[in-house]
Amino acid sequence: MLRLDQTQKPIQVQKITPNLVLTQKVLQLTALQIEKEIYQELQNNPALELSEETICQQCGLNIQSCNCENKNIENIEAITNRLLQLASNNYQYETSNEEDDYNEHNILKYEKTFQECLIEELKFLKLKEEHYKAGEYIISLIDENGFLNLNSLDYEEISNKFEISPEEINNIIRKIQSLEPIGIGVQSPKEALLKQLEELELSGKVNSISKTILKYYWDDFLKEDIKKLSKKLKAKTEEVKKAINFIKNNLSPYPINVLNFRNFKLHNLNTVKPDVIFTIRDGKVCSDFTDEVRLNVKINPLYLELYEKIKHNNSNLKKEEKQHIKECILRAKAFINCIQTRKNILNGIFNTIAKHQADFIKYGFSKLKPLRRKDIARELSISESTVSRALSNRYFSLPSGEIMSFDSLFDSSLYAKEFIKKIIANEDKKKPFSDESITKIMNQNGFKLARRTITKYREELKILPANLRKEK
């Protein structure tokens, strides 16, 4: 007989609060963007003001009362000098000669990322508000090669987040693909080349055979099998060679590299400013956050005093004035808490990575340990999505000077890819290694990988096949 019982079970559920939503958003902002928000909030909220005290960037306390190791003046100077040196590679200040200009209003010029440039272009498409916001989010998912590969979970997340249908998502993607550089937001090198060819067709500058080769004979093109292509196309050998040379000289398999072929104003694209510098001090791995917010804000003392009187029913202010003060104070507290939470979460994540990957940071890729975002989240008692957002589009610098993406730390193929890069870097440029040869070398060095896996890794590294690497 079926029995129905009522029982109570404790279930842990994360409550979505406005502060949590704000914190998740702020996690992905750069320090420069947050400082812009701070200036905006200072104008809108009279209960908020700039603080003159110096805050320890490690613990968040006044520098005079903290007990951090980095309080040592020699350490601070060494870190500061290195950060300034790194920052000077990508940033420069422009000051005005006007006598009444304040130092705080110096203009900080910085090189935009391709995502920022795309978002600026997106504004001119006159999209609905929810479509524009979805477009911004989709652009953030475009990888460093310019490709966009969304799976069913991505579609579901975007659909729920912005309350739009999959068809609307596809329409937004098509809009993004219409932006510069040509080929941005497609899924593969083949698509990127065809997109660029379509653009050249409009100007009448296309080799007629090139499009047919890319569309129908992709594998033969990669192998640069002239004889087979000539036979399939029923064309002369010279015509096929001319078509392949046209593709090589006018197109790029990676959308971001199209910038090199056009007058597109994006400088130092390959120069990445690290968000974190991992250093070794006294044999210990330390993490120094370079993208720290330099402005410190606090609650205006007068507003705080009035708020305390209101709380204790000791105020003669009108009802509207009391409500105004309460709203301003609560808004200021939420804003300050949000910035501090961002700092705590980021420092916690970076320090956890430094602890788990200390040997990798000291000795290189052979010491890289398996690490999942889930492991970091569990250790810090935060959600996996928070870790993912915090590390999105962020980079770190190793003691060797090499700069890497945080996302690469969670790529189990990283060590194998680095080995492939070394093999190709040391090959004879006139007789480059085929994927089959690379596979044999890899397996001789302890890897157990199939040729198709090597081909996949090589393509992910943006390295051309042997026939296209060959130098005459």
Image (cartoon, rainbow, N blue to C red):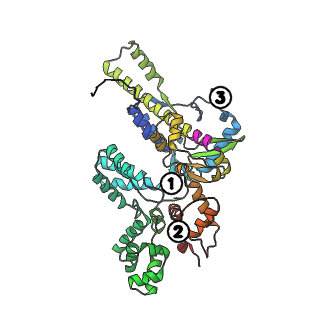
Secondary structure beneath label 1: loop
Give percent across and percent down for residue 235.
Answer: 40, 86
Q: Amino acid at mark 3?
A: Asn
Dot 3, crowdedness within 10 Å: few (<14), some or many (≥20)? few
Secondary structure beneath label 3: loop
Give percent across and percent down for residue 173.
Answer: 34, 56
Q: Is residue 144 above or below residue 216?
A: above
Q: Which residues are magenta?
A: 350-358
Residue matched to label 1 = 111
Q: Amino acid at mark 2?
A: Leu
Give percent across and percent down for residue 447.
Answer: 60, 59
Of labels 1 and 2, earlier in sequence is 1
What residue is shown at x 37% (from left), y 26% (from top)?
327
Give percent across and percent down for residue 325.
Answer: 38, 23
Q: Are marks 1 and 2 in contact (CB under 8 Å)?
A: no
Residue matched to label 3 = 67
Of labels 2 and 3, earlier in sequence is 3
Q: Are marks 2 and 3 in contact (CB under 8 Å)?
A: no
What residue is shown at x 58% (from left), y 76% (from top)?
471
Judge by depth and name the residue closer to the eye, 424 or 261: 424
Residue matched to label 2 = 464
- Give the quarter of the image for residue 161: top left
Residue 430 within the magenta-colored segment of the rendering: no
